[in-house]
């Protein structure tokens, strides 16, 4: 027979877990970013606290209170630098008479101005992008900044390591920041060898501190390389052989980076500095003088977003871009899991005659996201939104084109995770010449696609359709 004392202990533990579940449910209701998320967490925490409490500790929080942007927190050193930099950037702000007022709101979102005298070059696919990044780092004389979500210890990763070790031994200061989740499998030896060469290499740990110990929700998804404060590289590529198209399953890897010179580089650099300050509590000596590109005058904005934002910067950027469109809104994203407001905006744009296209991968790397995508196609297609699946290999770039005068390239996917949970960075160009280059690139991509329709879901077996609906229910955390 079971000992009465054991039964009493089980009863006490069960009671305490239910009390903890109720308290956690109250916290979820007060802090969840969406009503759907609040309801889902609250019900599960109350009814199944035994399973849900551990999951909530890991995935539940939607706001990263541990990371506070230094200029908002009032740290004297960072705040002073931010104010001084913004003042310098204002010197390159586009004149009001030359600037479309519909984009002024983006400056408020970014807390930085659109600046002129930038030079931007699209880097299409890994070979071109890494050739440019490696050349930029080779030319560095003072310092190199490297920040990636994923760094692998493979051929490309070791090539990067060798370059950074050599530059560090030549007297160039090298700062490397990587995400603790994305680089979970990065060997300690890789990091140790870089450190022994004089490279300052650190992980961005959102699990830092007792309160965040089990938190894996917040990931630093930014990909930044900067050389001497003169040239920067931002886009969708991480460091790994698969990004050069060497993965057997995914085949050719379709991605886009952008190389920029000009005042926008300092804004990108400040985004890195905030992350570095969180990781180290220190401020490296960097060049904060905006240098105009001598032969170009492209208008650019650095728009960083993260889960400590008081407003949903990334989501509002997407919404503003869609609502601003009059002729076209083209979106390329490997992960398409929008919330209700973005879906409604896409449908309304199509109804008012805008050419709305969404490019998705044919080959999935995240099954749940892939399944959820079928439900969005079925929902948006009747309004006139057109979906395309890229055929040659895995499509991973994050690009938006609005009409003929606004284009964005960066790290943010069109999903809830990028909008609410990740640290992201988009470079926005209010420039017809750059937009035309992006348009040409996307037209070539669409030529490599097949159009996806709602009929594809209707023709699938019933278990598949059930899986699609279940995946859609999980959309807030995908």
Image (spheres, rainbow, N blue to C red):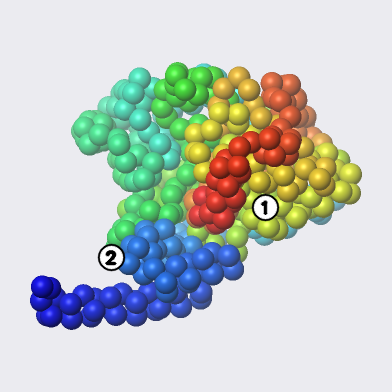
Above or below, comparing residue 446 to residue 184 in the picture: above
Q: Which residue matches tag 1?
A: 317
Report the front residue among 82 and 73. Answer: 73
Quadrant of residue 214 in the image?
bottom left
Bin the neighbour count of mark 2 within 10 Å (Cα to Cα): few under 14, some 14-19, many 20 and up. Answer: few
Residue 469 visible from this viewpoint: yes
Above or below, comparing residue 242 to residue 232 in the picture: above
Quadrant of residue 150 in the image?
top left
Residue 398 visible from this viewpoint: no
Q: Residue at x 28, y 75 (%)?
A: 14
Q: Residue at x 46, y 32 (%)?
A: 238
Left or right of 413: which side holds 138? left
Report the front residue among 429 and 181. Answer: 181
Q: Residue at x 50, y 39 (%)?
A: 367
Q: Which badge, 1 or 2, comes first in the chain's sequence? A: 2
Under tag 2, what secondary structure? Answer: helix
């Amino acid at each position: 027979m079971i000992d009465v004392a054991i039964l009493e202990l089980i009863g006490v533990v069960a009671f305490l877990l239910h009390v903890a579940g109720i308290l956690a449910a109250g916290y979820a209701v007060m802090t969840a970013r969406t009503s759907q998320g609040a309801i889902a967490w609250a019900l599960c925490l109350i009814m199944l606290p035994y399973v849900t409490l551990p999951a909530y500790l890991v995935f539940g929080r939607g706001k990263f209170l541990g990371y506070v942007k230094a200029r908002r927190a009032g740290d004297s050193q960072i705040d002073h630098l931010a104010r001084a930099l913004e003042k310098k950037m204002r010197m390159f702000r586009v004149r009001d008479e030359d600037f479309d007022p519909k984009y002024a709101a983006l400056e408020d979102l970014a807390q930085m101005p659109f600046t002129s005298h930038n030079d931007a070059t699209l880097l299409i696919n890994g070979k071109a992008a890494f050739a440019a990044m490696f050349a930029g780092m080779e030319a560095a004389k003072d310092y190199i900044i490297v920040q990636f979500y994923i760094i692998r210890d493979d051929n490309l990763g070791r090539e990067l390591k060798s370059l950074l070790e050599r530059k560090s031994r030549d007297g160039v200061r090298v700062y490397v920041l990587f995400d603790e989740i994305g680089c979970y499998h990065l060997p300690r030896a890789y990091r140790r060898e870089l450190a022994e060469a004089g490279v300052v290499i650190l992980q961005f740990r959102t699990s830092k501190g007792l309160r965040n110990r089990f938190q894996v929700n917040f990931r630093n998804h930014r990909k930044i390389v900067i050389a001497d404060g003169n040239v920067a590289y931002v886009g969708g590529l991480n460091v790994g052989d698969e990004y050069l198209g060497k993965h057997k399953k995914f085949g050719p890897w379709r991605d886009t980076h952008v190389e920029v010179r000009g005042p926008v580089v300092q804004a990108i650099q400040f985004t890195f500095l905030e992350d570095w300050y969180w990781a180290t509590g220190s401020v490296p000596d960097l060049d904060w003088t905006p240098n105009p590109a001598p032969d170009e005058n492209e208008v650019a904005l650095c728009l960083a977003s993260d889960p400590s934002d008081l407003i949903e910067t990334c989501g509002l950027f997407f919404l503003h871009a869609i609502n601003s469109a009059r002729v076209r809104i083209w979106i390329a994203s490997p992960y398409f899991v929008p919330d209700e407001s973005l879906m409604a905006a896409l449908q309304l744009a199509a109804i008012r005659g805008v050419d709305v296209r969404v490019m998705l991968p044919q080959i999935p790397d995240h099954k749940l996201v892939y399944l959820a995508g079928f439900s969005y196609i079925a929902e948006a297609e009747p309004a006139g939104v057109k979906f395309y699946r890229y055929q040659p290999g895995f499509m991973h770039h994050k690009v938006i084109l609005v009409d003929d005068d606004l284009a964005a390239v960066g790290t943010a996917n069109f999903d809830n995770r990028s909008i609410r949970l990740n640290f992201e960075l988009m470079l926005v160009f209010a420039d017809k010449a750059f937009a035309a280059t992006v348009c040409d690139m996307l037209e070539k991509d669409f030529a490599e696609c097949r159009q996806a329709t709602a009929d594809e879901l209707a023709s699938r077996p019933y278990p598949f359709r059930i899986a699609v609906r279940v995946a859609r229910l999980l959309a807030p955390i995908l």
